[in-house]
Image (cartoon, helix red, strand yellow):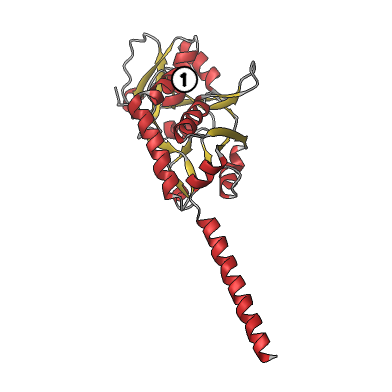
Amino acid sequence: MELSRFVRGLLAAGITAFSTLAAGGAHGADLLDTVKERGVLIVGVEGTYPPFNFVDTKTKELDGFDIDVAKLIAGKLGVKVQFVKTEWSGILAGLSSGKFDVILNQVGITAEREKTFDFSVPYVASSPQLILRKNDGSQYKSFADLKGKKLGVSQGSNYEALAKAQEGVEVKSYPGAPEYLSDLVSKRVDAALNDQLMTAYLVKTSNIPIQGGAIVGEPKFNGIPFKKGNPEFKAALDKALEDSFADGEFARISAKWFGIDVSKVQKPK
């Protein structure tokens, strides 16, 4: 009886060890293997964030800069792409829980986020930029040039806080871009402030007589986050992006939406 109990104990220990190894092997599988085997890259997006990702009112399909980039990357990985719409408030948690493989939604690369996720090489560089009236002779090259002048910004935005930190600049806050751009064109403000990408998009797509002005802040970089511990996936993802930078495919997508190559840091004028 003691021998039988001993044998049963060995068998149980063996089964437990095998189960642990099997689970460890499954957990240790690199995301690249998972994506290749599945044949699909699952991408988290908001779907309500134009021009980056949104539902086209005519086709009822997702469209936007990040949608095009996701399709480009999936193609270079040799797989299809599937999008999962998720509100921004829950998108990082969705990545942690395995709801999708990556996020393409203009996620800033920060030290805090890098504690939890790995990131691709940056694919977007963006800085605060002044917006001026088209063909305006005013030369505002810095916040110092705007002392005593009126600067329009969106209420509650990061740019409102940045503008209000500038000594001598009169800041006027608006519900959004349409309102402050209207006042800019009507000369009720001297300049406006927004993100460089949004400025480029507005200049390219709107009929408003505006132009991008000086870059007035340090660039921030956005990347594609995914779960830590997937070095093969990171290498493949980085290669897909870097190849698209080199062969001009990324620049063509960027020009389509913004008129500039957003992978490159725009220099102050």
Which residue does the numbered mark 1 point to in the structure image? 257
Q: Is residue 117 above or below residue 188?
A: below
| Quadrant placement of the N terminus | bottom right
The image quadrant that residue 40 belongs to is: top right
- Residue 63 lies, with reference to residue 225, above or below; the image says above
Q: Residue at x 42, y 44 (%)?
A: 234
Please provide percent x and percent y for residue 239.
Answer: 38, 37
Q: Secondary structure at mark 1?
A: helix
Q: Pinpoint residue 73: horizontal percent, then vertical percent.
A: 46, 32
Q: Position of residue 268 (x, y in %)?
A: 30, 25
> Does residue 157 appear left or right of residue 1 in this picture?
left
Residue 32 drawn at (x, y percent): 48, 45
Left or right for 103, reference 84: left
Q: Residue furthest right?
A: 1
Q: Is residue 143 visible?
A: no
Quick check: 32 left or right of 62? left
Residue plotted at (39% across, 18% down) = 212
Q: Is residue 127 left or right of residue 90?
A: left
Q: Is residue 152 above or below residue 121?
A: above
In depth, the one of 162 and 19 nearer the eye is 19
**Closer to the camera, 23 or 117?**
23
Q: Residues within 10 Å of mark 1 (few under 14, many from 20)?
A: many
Front residue of 237/50: it is 237
Residue under the point 32% across and 23% down = 145
Q: Quadrant of the C terminus?
A: top left
Amino acid type, mark 1? Trp
> Can residue 10 be seen here?
yes
- Count how many numbered circles sit on residues in the image: 1
Q: Residue at x 31, y 22 (%)?
A: 141
Q: Is residue 215 above or below residue 203?
A: below
